[in-house]
Image (cartoon, grey):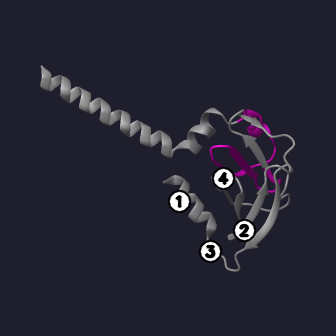
Amino acid sequence: MFIQYFSVTLILSLLVSLVNSIVSSSYDFIFQQYHFPPYLLLQQSQIASITSNKDYTVVAFQKDGIKWIDNIKCIPIENAFVSLNGTIISAIAISQDSKFLFTSSDNRLSIYSVSTDNKFALTYLKQSAEQYGVYNHFRSHNQQ
């Protein structure tokens, strides 16, 4: 009886640790499934890429710029400066501290500094000179 109890307890604890590791590694997916504002899906613009960290989610539309969402309040940040209009974005990423935004346009990695205290204005820092296939890199990273 004790061995059966111990075996069941061990299996349950392993399952709990497995679920915790899956949940923690799939934060972007869970946020998008349960907290994604539905009105963004009703817009005419096509969403090119979505990324998030603990504080913000950034939605990049194919040609209509980007939109910032507050993860804590689960609402769009209406006073955020809409930038990157007219730029075709295939992938986007944000640093964990929300200070840098990475985009892929024409498979060239661009880096922007984010001013969260100034309506999320972006300051262009650098773009790669070569085409590196950034889209594939971001895509494979997000799928892992």
Q: Residues within 10 Å of mark 1 (few under 14, many from 20)?
A: few
Q: Nearer the viewer, mark 1 or mark 2?
A: 2
User: Nearer the N terminus, badge 3 or badge 2?
Assistant: 2
User: Nearer the N terminus, badge 2 or badge 4?
Assistant: 4
- In percent of width and height, residue 36 lies at 68, 36
Q: Quadrant of the N terminus?
A: top left
Q: Nearer the viewer, mark 2 or mark 4?
A: 4
In the image, what residue type sits under mark 3?
Tyr
Q: Residue at x 65, y 56 (%)?
A: 95
Position of 117 relative to 18 (above/below): below
Q: Residues within 10 Å of mark 2 (few under 14, many from 20)?
A: some
Magenta stretch: includes residue 83: no
User: Nearer the N terminus, badge 4 or badge 1?
Assistant: 4
The residue labelled by disc 4 is: 97
Q: Nearer the viewer, mark 3 or mark 2?
A: 2
Q: Residues within 10 Å of mark 3 (few under 14, many from 20)?
A: some
Q: Nearer the viewer, mark 4 or mark 3?
A: 4
**SS class, disc 1:** helix
In the image, what residue type sits under mark 4?
Asp
Position of 109 relative to 43 (above/below): below
User: Nearer the N terminus, badge 4 or badge 3?
Assistant: 4
The residue labelled by disc 2 is: 110
The residue labelled by disc 1 is: 140
